[in-house]
Amino acid sequence: MSRRLLAWVACFAASAALGLGPAGADDASDSNSSVLVTLTPLKQGSLPHIVIGYGTVEPSAAGDETIMAPAAAVVAEIDVRLGEKVPAGAPLIRLAPSPATAASYTQARSALAVAERLVASTRKLVAGHLATVQQLADAEKSESDARSTLQALDAVGAGGPHVIRAPFRAIVTTLSTTPGAIVAEGTALLDLAAPQSLVLNVGVVPAQAAAIHANDTAAVRLIGGARPVSAKVLVCGAVAEADTGLVPVEISLPPAGFLPGEMAQAAITTGEQSGYLVPHAAILVNDGGEPYVVQAVNGVAHKVPVQVLVAHGARDVISGKLDARAPLVLSGNYQLDDGMKVRLADSPPAQGTAGRK
């Protein structure tokens, strides 16, 4: 063997030792490569369609009452504190007549006394034929008016100290006055809320509000709370609020477990959404931000664009041009491209891939 032939053989042996070989050898190997995956059957199913809203616990219109001053008065004493629970009939505020109210009461008593004397004297004159029956009727009418005025002033405490009491079992939500204040008739003194008539007012985006209707069920959970409670939608607004851009939704609450002013989340179930029910792990997103899944058709990967109709926990409902007979790829789906071969986790490696790591 010549020296030139020996040199060529040595060079070929070194190339083989370094893993070099004829062009196309690696391409042939790559054409037989596969990705280890797990599959799940494609199934039809449904999930509840849920709208989420956040809001504040407030008294309902039927359970909210503003206590107002029945007449001009001086606030002598306040018997409750803000946020206090009070039983029905409990004293709330003690009022004393203002100087003007006291003067009106004195005048009303005096007017009644004068009217009574006028009636008595007119009756004597009628008996002596010195006055007419009409004059007696006018005197009696004046007496009746004076008595009604005095009774009205008595009812509002104009004749002395007056105690305003709770009309029902309630929570004091607002205190609008202070001891010693002089208040006019009709001035708001405090607000009461019936604890059994609380509601949750939440806001939802207009696109979702159209799906909400009265009597829809809702799961209400206080912010920071552990367990949600069952509730129902009372009414859904038809106009977005100017300051938030959200549509108000009022939800009834059970009679216990909530306090006015607390923040809560409501998960409102508006119906069921049907389609292909798949694990959330099967959903991927491409570079354009569009969702897709990978199906294994005869052992070959196929990407299929989908629309996510509902996402709830670890499962989604999707729609798209899917092959109902082909399973979805779960683990390993992010490694796949159209046309790549798939290999099940418990399947032997494909021919030509033995020994690959």
Image (cartoon, rainbow, N blue to C red):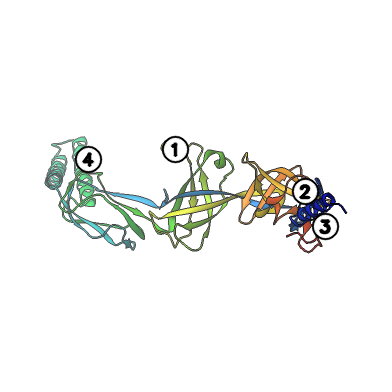
Q: Mark 2 or mark 3, which is nearer the start of the sequence?
A: 2
Q: Nearer the viewer, residue 255 or 117?
A: 255
Residue drawn at x 77%, y 48% is 340
Q: Nearer the viewer, residue 231 or 262?
A: 262
Q: Nearer the viewer, residue 62 or 290?
A: 290
Q: Nearer the viewer, residue 138 or 295?
A: 295
For label 4, the residue is 141
Residue drawn at x 64%, y 48% is 310
Q: Amino acid at mark 2?
A: Met
3D distance between C-alphas at marks 4 and 3: 113 Å
Could you tell me residue 209's position as x and y percent? Answer: 55, 42
**Residue 325 appears in the rendering:** no
For label 3, the residue is 350
Tag 3's secondary structure? loop
Q: Nearer the viewer, mark 3 or mark 2?
A: 3
Q: Amino acid at mark 1?
A: Glu
For label 2, the residue is 340
Q: Residues within 10 Å of mark 3 (few under 14, many from 20)?
A: few
Q: Which mark, residue 241? A: 1
Circle 3/circle 2 CB separation < 8 Å: no
